[in-house]
Image: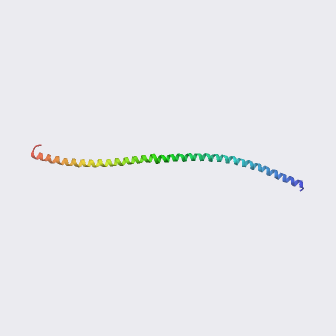
C-alpha cells in the first residue's frame, strides 16, 4: 500500500470520526436542553414545596393557637356541666328523701285521724 493510499485511509477515518463527533455534539446539545428542562422543573418543585411548607406552618399555628384553645374551652365547659349535673342529682336525691319523710308524716297523721274517726 502506497503512502497516498494510507493517507486516503487516514483521511476517511478522520472524516468518519468527525461525523461521529457531530452526532455526539448533537446528542450532548440535546442532553443540555433536557437538563435545562429538568432544572426548570426542579425550581418549580422547590417553589411548590416552599408554598406547602408555608401552608403547613399556617395550619399548625391555627391548630395550636385556635383549635387547641377552643377544645380547652369546650372541655372546661363540660367539666362545669358535669359538676352542675352532680349538684342537680344530689339536690334531687335530697328533695326525694325529704318528700319520703313528708309522705311518712302525712300517712301517720292520716292514720291518727282515721283512728279518731275524723276522716
Give the position of the N terminus as an image quadrant.
bottom right
User: Count of labels shown?
Assistant: 0
Give the position of the C terminus as an image quadrant.
top left
Left or right: where does residue 34 sit relative to residue 62? right
Q: Choose between 19 and 55: the one closer to the eye.
A: 55
Q: Choose between 97 and 46: the one closer to the eye.
A: 46
Residue at 36% from the left image edge and 49% from the top image edge: 79
Q: Choose between 101 and 44: the one closer to the eye.
A: 44
Left or right: where does residue 97 sit relative to residue 9? left
Seen as rendered, the residue at the extreme top is 119
Residue at 57% from the left image edge and 47% from the top image edge: 50
The spot of residue 73 in percent (x, y) is 40, 46
The spot of residue 108 in percent (x, y) is 15, 48
Colouring rule applied to residues: rainbow
Residue at 67% from the left image edge and 48% from the top image edge: 35
Seen as rendered, the residue at the extreme right is 2
The spot of residue 28 in percent (x, y) is 72, 49
The spot of residue 20 in percent (x, y) is 77, 50
Q: Choose between 23 and 77: the one closer to the eye.
A: 77
Left or right: where does residue 90 sit relative to residue 104? right
Residue at 70% from the left image edge and 48% from the top image edge: 32
Left or right: where does residue 106 sit relative to residue 93? left
Seen as rendered, the residue at the extreme left is 116
Amino acid at each position: 500500500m502506497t503512502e497516498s493510499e494510507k493517507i486516503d485511509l487516514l483521511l476517511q477515518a478522520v472524516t468518519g470520526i468527525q461525523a461521529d463527533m457531530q452526532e455526539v455534539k448533537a446528542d450532548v446539545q440535546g442532553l443540555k436542553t433536557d437538563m435545562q428542562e429538568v432544572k426548570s422543573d426542579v425550581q418549580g418543585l422547590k417553589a411548590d414545596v416552599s408554598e406547602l411548607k408555608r401552608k403547613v406552618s399556617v395550619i399548625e399555628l391555627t391548630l395550636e393557637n385556635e383549635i387547641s384553645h377552643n377544645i380547652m374551652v369546650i372541655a372546661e365547659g363540660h367539666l362545669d356541666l358535669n359538676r352542675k349535673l352532680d349538684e342537680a342529682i344530689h339536690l334531687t336525691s335530697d328533695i326525694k328523701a325529704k318528700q319520703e319523710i313528708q309522705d311518712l308524716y302525712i300517712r301517720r297523721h292520716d292514720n291518727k285521724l282515721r283512728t279518731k274517726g275524723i276522716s
